[in-house]
Image: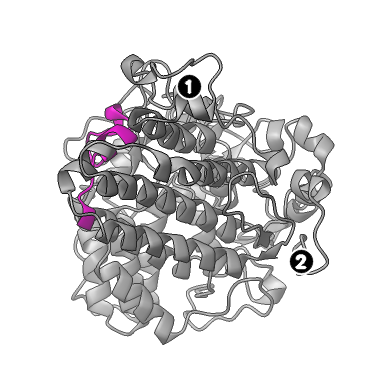
């Protein structure tokens, strides 16, 4: 494992995002644990940089420049939220469906299916050439996890001022939270993973994604328990205000209270359940079934009730959440290339990512979010599926009180790193609808639309059926959570990314072919539901005899 993680001490050097006074510890040109991480300031720098540098910046300069551009970009491509024309990093191929059927019955087939592409290029040589899509998210999340392990290994030796126990527990909760985040990312994306909870200690016992998700839940719960043990809220705040980059402490970002942070944790625990079990809704059928899947079973009433319970005590409107923003220099993502949103917000013909027609079709007539964020000033044409008539507008069109998806000016775009009010509310919406409390679920959808300034007529109290309510829910999740890397997991659990022969597929799609606008096209994505372990890991760290498969056996 440790062969694959690098640059840990860049966290000490860059850990405070440009705050020079906090960098003046030991020798910044040759940092060591004993010289640089022996004070309160030193361990805070390490804990901050281990997240924002090791976790979200290192290794992602192939396309865009952060974890939120390329790894999240693959998710947005497979969600069919964006398309791409560049040949680097396999961005043109990863999100291409196996076939499409147009309104007139014409079938168009992809001669290089996504599963084959992923496996062809899952090699160490392809990684070195920047063509192994599977590599990046694994790299970042295990780097993040390992950095947290390092901080945890030294925090009890630090001579803190004030209430030492509260300050140490704040840093421990920080590490447990981000370890939970890292394991959730691995367990939701990869078929198998590694549990590594000691710095410098490797493992070659590969375990199923379910086990990785259980480890995520363990650390999220440990973070909550640790937060409950903090007795000095002033010392807690004194540490956390330094751990979170100061320029991100605006808007929805900032220093959460202990109770707010616990609600953030509950939202992530609910997400872990929701994104990793099937809840099929194929072709508007809430009773659809998928006959072959690597997911952790099908959502039951007990699961929906667990999501409802967690989300009820999850992020509330006005809670501080974990966000990112850019500065002019020295940050963990850039304003123009650090997020999927920024990489769409330019002329669609030249943009790295092009907003998809399948996104636009989810905006209801009169939705001000569409009016404020998209135009038809340019067009991108593609012979298969990525033709789009729409551009994402940088900074929006100036409609007051309406959400803006992308802004390429430094400090303007708010990146949502973990959970949010709107995601939590939409989990409550879906749980209530699935538990037959339809109007309660629809009221959460109305709340989210109002929160974003959509200006749409309420759908609660209008007598919608379960199928109609779930259609509102799926559309709103696609719109409200756009560019956040979650929509692929939604499409997977709803069954849309599975092969039609297995009960999956996506129906009623808009696909533009030349001058013809198809509005009822069928798409057979047939994507691998959980990715194989990257070859860099499995080749350099061969599986033990007790390991599970490192390749998804269902594909």
Side of 337 where 17 appears, left or right: left
Indicate whether residue 254 is drawn in magenta: yes
538 inside magenta stretch: no
Which of the two residues, 435 or 97, is positioned nearer the viewer here? 435
Pointer 2: what residue?
Answer: 547
Please say whether residue 62 is visible from this viewpoint.
yes
The residue singled out by tag 1 in the image is 13
Q: Which residues are magenta?
A: 240-259
Nearer-the-camera pick, 53 or 326: 53
* Circle 1 SS class: helix
Compare residues 41 and 409 and report the one nearer the observer: 41
Q: What residue is shown at x 50% (from left), y 75% (from top)?
A: 279
Crowd class of label 2 (few under 14; some 14 to 19; many from 20; radius 10 Å): some
Q: Which mark is residue 247?
A: none
Question: Would residue 544 appear left or right of 332 to someone viewing this image?
Answer: right
Estimate the spatial distance between the alpha carbons at disc 1 and disc 2, rounded to whole Å: 37 Å
Q: Earlier in the sequence, mark 1 or mark 2?
A: 1
Seen in the image, is 39 located left or right of residue 314? right
């Amino acid at each position: 494992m440790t062969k694959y993680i690098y640059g840990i001490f860049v966290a000490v050097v860059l850990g405070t995002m440009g705050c020079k006074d906090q960098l003046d510890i030991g020798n910044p040109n040759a940092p060591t644990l004993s010289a640089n991480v022996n004070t309160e300031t030193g361990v805070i720098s390490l804990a901050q940089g281990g997240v924002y540098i090791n976790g979200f910046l290192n290794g992602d300069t192939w396309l865009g420049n952060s974890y939120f551009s390329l790894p999240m970009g693959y998710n947005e491509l497979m969600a069919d939220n964006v398309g791409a024309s560049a040949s680097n990093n396999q961005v043109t191929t990863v999100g291409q469906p196996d076939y499409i059927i147009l309104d007139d019955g014409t079938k168009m087939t992809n001669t290089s299916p996504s599963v084959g592409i992923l496996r062809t290029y899952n090699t160490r040589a392809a990684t070195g050439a920047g063509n192994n899509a599977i590599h990046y998210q694994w790299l970042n999340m295990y780097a993040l996890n390992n950095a947290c392990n390092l901080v945890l290994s030294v925090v009890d030796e630090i001579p803190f001022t004030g209430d030492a126990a509260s300050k140490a527990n704040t840093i421990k909760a920080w590490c447990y939270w981000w370890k939970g985040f890292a394991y959730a990312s691995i367990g939701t994306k990869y078929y198998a993973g590694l549990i590594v909870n000691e710095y410098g200690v490797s493992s070659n016992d590969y375990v199923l994604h379910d086990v990785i998700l259980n480890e995520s839940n363990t650390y999220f719960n440990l973070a909550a328990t640790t937060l409950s043990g903090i007795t000095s809220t002033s010392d807690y705040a004194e540490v956390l205000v330094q751990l979170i980059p100061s320029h991100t402490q605006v808007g929805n970002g900032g220093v959460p209270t202990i109770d707010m942070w616990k609600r953030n944790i509950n939202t992530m625990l609910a997400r872990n359940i929701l994104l990793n079990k099937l809840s099929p809704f194929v072709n508007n059928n809430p009773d659809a079934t998928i006959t072959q899947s690597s997911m952790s079973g099908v959502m039951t009433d007990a699961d929906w009730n667990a999501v409802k319970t967690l989300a009820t005590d999850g992020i509330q409107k006005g809670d501080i959440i974990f966000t990112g923003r850019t500065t002019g220099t020295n940050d963990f993502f850039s304003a123009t290339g650090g997020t999927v949103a920024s990489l769409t917000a330019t002329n669609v013909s030249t943009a790295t990512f092009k907003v998809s027609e399948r996104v636009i079709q989810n905006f209801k007539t009169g939705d001000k979010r569409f009016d404020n964020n998209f135009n038809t000033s340019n067009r991108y044409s593609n012979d298969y599926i990525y033709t789009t008539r729409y551009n994402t507008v940088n900074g929006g069109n100036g409609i007051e009180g309406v959400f803006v998806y992308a802004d390429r000016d430094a400090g303007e775009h708010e990146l949502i790193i973990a959970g949010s009010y709107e995601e939590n509310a939409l989990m409550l919406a879906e749980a209530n609808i699935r538990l037959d409390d339809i109007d309660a679920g629809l009221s959460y959808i109305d709340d989210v639309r109002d929160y974003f300034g959509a200006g749409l007529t309420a759908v609660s109290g209008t007598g919608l059926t379960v199928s109609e309510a779930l259609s509102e829910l799926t559309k709103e999740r696609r719109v409200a959570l756009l560019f956040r890397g979650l929509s692929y997991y939604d499409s997977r659990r709803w069954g849309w990314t599975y092969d039609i022969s297995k009960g999956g597929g996506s129906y009623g799609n808009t696909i533009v072919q030349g001058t013809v606008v198809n509005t009822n096209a069928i798409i057979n994505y047939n994507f691998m539901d959980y990715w194989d372990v990257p070859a860099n890991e499995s080749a350099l760290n061969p599986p033990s005899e007790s390991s599970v498969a490192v390749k998804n056996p269902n594909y």
